[in-house]
Image: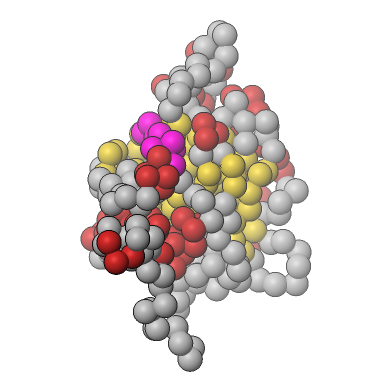
Amino acid sequence: MNVGNCFPINGKIETECLSVALFQMKLAVVPKSREEVMENVDKIIEWIERTVTGFPGIDMIVTPEASLNGVGPHASLCCVTLDGPELARLRAVCKEFQIWLAVGACVDEKDGNFYKNCAITINDHGEIVDIYRKVTPWNPVEPSSPGDEIRVFEGPKGSRIASIICSDGDYQDNWREAAAKGANVVLRLTTYMTPFENQYEITNRAGAYFNKVYVVAANTSEMDECYSLFGRSMVVNPEGDIIAQAPVGIPYIFKADLYPGLCDAIQKQTLMGDLLWLREHRGAASPDTHGKGKDTTMYTYLEGK
C-alpha cells in the first residue's frame, strides 16, 4: 500500500495534545526464521501509512508486545538485532513521516544471554531513544532473559514515558517505579489472552489511577498457536477512566488525545489527586502534622526480606 501522496502537503499538522495511535494487530506470519520477520515489518509499515493518512498530525504509534516476532518457543529462532535491517526500515519510516513509534520485538543483544523481550521506541528523527527490556517475563512459559530497570525518557509534547510489557503490569511495583521516576505516560505492550480479560482491564485502570498517569495499552488480537488473544486495547486517563478502547478480537487502529501536562498539574497540587505525595505525607490535613503529614515508616512489609 502506498499512500504517501495523501500525506498533508505542508507536512505534519501540529496540535497541543499528544496524539497516540494504537495498533491492535496480529502477526502477518509467525516467523520461524530471521528472514520471515520482515513480513511483519512490512505489515507494520503498511499500518503506519494508513495511520498517518487517516489521522493527520499523529505524534506516536504503539504496537503490541513482540509484534515483530511473536512470543513463544519460536522466538529464539527469529530474534532481531538492534543494528539489523528490520529496525533500520522502521527508523527510516519514522523519520519520513515525523512520528514516534514504540514497537515490540524479541532482541538478541549479542551479550551471551538469551533473547530480551523489548519495547523499542524510535523518535521522529529515526533515532532509537529507548530500549526497554521486560523485567518480569511471564512464568512458567516465557524464556526471555529479564531486564533490570523501569526506565523513563522524554517523549513528545511534554510527555515523560515509561514502557512496560504485558505481565509487567500485573505487579504494582513496576507501575510505582515508573511514576516515582516521573513518568506521566506508561506504554503497556501486551499479548494478553483469554480468560484474563478482567485482569487486563483492572490492572490498566488501577495502574493509571493509583499513579496518576495515562496508560496506553496495545494488545494483540485474534488467535495464535495456543491462545485466543482478545484485543480490547485501551487508553486510560489518570482518573482510571477508559477514554478510548478497541473492540474484542479484531484488527483495529484507533487514536486518543492525551494531555501529559494534566498529570504534571495533579502531581504539583499535593492534594487529593496526588496519591504518590500522600503516601509520603500521611494525614497532611490534620493540624497535628502541620500540613506535612507523616512519612512511610509504618509500612513494615519489607522488613527482614
Name the residue: 76% across, 67% down: 111
Rendering quarter of residue 247: top left
Residue reaching furthest bottom? 304
Q: List x then y, in percent, for residue 8.
A: 52, 12
- Against 265, residue 223 (above or below) is below
Q: List x then y, in percent, for residue 97.
A: 59, 24
Left or right, 81 with reference to 185: right
**Can residue 222 be spotted in the picture?**
no
Q: Which one is nearer the viewer's eye here, 177 or 27? A: 177
Name the residue: 50% across, 19% down: 14
Magenta region, residue range: 256-264
- Against 283, residue 130 (above or below) is above
Left or right, 252 with reference to 35: left
**Can residue 126 be spotted in the picture?**
yes
Q: Which one is nearer the viewer's eye here, 271 or 176? A: 271
Question: How many tags in the picture?
Answer: 0
Question: Is 263 one of the magenta-colored residues?
Answer: yes
Residue reaching furthest top? 9
- Against 24, residue 151 (above or below) is below
Rendering quarter of residue 279: bottom left
Question: Is 129 one of the magenta-colored residues?
Answer: no
- How has the structure been colored for display? secondary structure
Q: List x then y, in percent, for residue 147.
A: 60, 67
Name the residue: 41% across, 64% down: 280
Left or right, 281 with reference to 150: left
Q: List x then y, in percent, for residue 240.
A: 28, 49
Name the residue: 44% across, 36% down: 261
